[in-house]
Image (tube, rainbow, N blue to C red):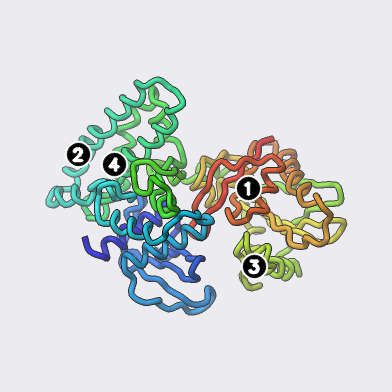
Amino acid sequence: MTDEDRIHRTVREWAHETQVRPDPDGTLRWPLTSTGLELVAETSRLSATGHHVLADVRVEYGPADGDRAPAGPLTAPLLAALLAAEVAYRGGGRAEWDPAAASAALVAAAATDEGAPFVTADGGSALAESLQGRSPAEIRSWFAEWAGSVLLPAVRRFDAEPVDETTEAAAARLSDGCLRRRVIGVVGALGAAGLADEAELVADLRGLLAPLAEDSALVRTWLEASVLPSRAGLITGLRGRDEVFGPTGAYIETVNPLRTAAPSEVHAGVPGPVLPELGEGWDLRLVDPDSSDVDMVTRWMAFPHVERGWRQAWPREQWAAELAAQRAGNATIPCIASFHGVPTAYIELYRAVRSPLADRYEAWSHDIGIHIAIAEIGTIGKGAGTWLVRELGSGTFAADPGCRRIVGEPNVHNLATLRLVEKVGYRLPREIPYPHKNAALIIRTP
């Protein structure tokens, strides 16, 4: 395996775990906050199953809003070191964590199919090579037979086991290892080799599984869920976990490759967020994108304590466009919260099924997401911010009776926010990765 192969394989897994969305031209980008660099991958083919064909991978430096230049030749060890540093920065690191050892383990794992933490670590490429010369119809027929021989016995064995405290973990391992990494991995490899149409193979796979759905809760989940469990081999391994590239490891939820529509399409008829009412000296109003509100939000986002959590210290023009787009759509409403008449906080209420968060957890149709930046902390008394966060949730439940969950994804570094939301009743079930940060999923029920 060449150094370029290792780089491409690592980048595909990073894309899968961070759920990056491509630019209009198909380019994948990740800010590497720990080093001030940006990882850029140009694609010659985007894959719905994550088996992208990469044309060029490089690291760039320079101002985020200006011209950027390549940082020099990229090697597999250098990429591993950069990702190890990024993962450590995102997650806060560990006292016993050894970045050099983690990088070396990643380089070694990228060169082998055995135990590697990659979507393509199932030998799918080798299978694709063995099928060269067959017609698309022959390959579809072969795939249906092969996938059935892999999945159907596994499902029957799982369904025959009694339900107990190990069932959820066993379902996650089967969903990730057998369905996603093995069977879907072959779909991606066949598509990348130009031997088959991925969409047709996925449709064939759904048809294969459909007869089992009535009697198998696992298969119903595979066919109906928006997201499925996926082992985060890079993100957990480079954090220094003992199970680095083994068969276990922490799980995240990523887009279900069998889903037929995105949550925003499934729930297209759900209305946008509703402005809740507050009290106790607090007032909440919509942002006016044609007023000085834009200047105020721009200034607030540059405050150090806000920038640390939001990382959106954008120029005024970018905020003006963002706020205008939010007001024109039905996904997010931008708000200003004032305390006794003094503008104090910027708040976004968003319909979760229309946000990137819906690719990272199983969103309900009326879930409301909240972003809060209490900017003018000197203008409120002790406990007033806690009251605002608590009542914003309560007010949202009252204003939108269909909403049964308030959710959010603050940066894991934003410890003050995490302590505050726990105090007012939010659960923090797990960490979720984004292209630009690791976030804590937070959930509150009435």
Q: Position of residue 243 (x, y in %)?
A: 38, 45
Q: Which residue is mark 2?
A: 141
**Amino acid residing under circle 1:** Gly
CA separation in Å, label 3 and label 1? 20 Å
Q: Residues within 10 Å of mark 2 (few under 14, many from 20)?
A: few
Residue at 57%, 46% in the rendered image = 441
Q: Nearer the viewer, mark 1 or mark 2?
A: 1
N-term-proximal mark, 1 vs 4: 4
Foreground residue among 412 and 281: 412
CA separation in Å, label 1 and label 2? 44 Å
Q: Which residue is mark 3?
A: 319
Residue at 31%, 25% in the rendered image = 157
Labelled pair 1, 4 in contact (Cβ < 8 Å): no
Foreground residue among 402 and 348: 348
Residue 68 vertical position relative to residue 126 in the rendered view, above or below: below
Labelled pair 2, 4 in contact (Cβ < 8 Å): no
Q: Is residue 431 visible?
A: yes
The N terminus: image quadrant: bottom left
Q: Residues within 10 Å of mark 1 (few under 14, many from 20)?
A: many
N-term-proximal mark, 1 vs 2: 2
N-term-proximal mark, 3 vs 4: 4
**Amino acid residing under circle 3:** Trp
Tag on residue 183?
A: 4
N-term-proximal mark, 2 vs 3: 2
Q: Position of residue 247 (x, y in %)?
A: 34, 41
**Amino acid residing under circle 2:** Ser
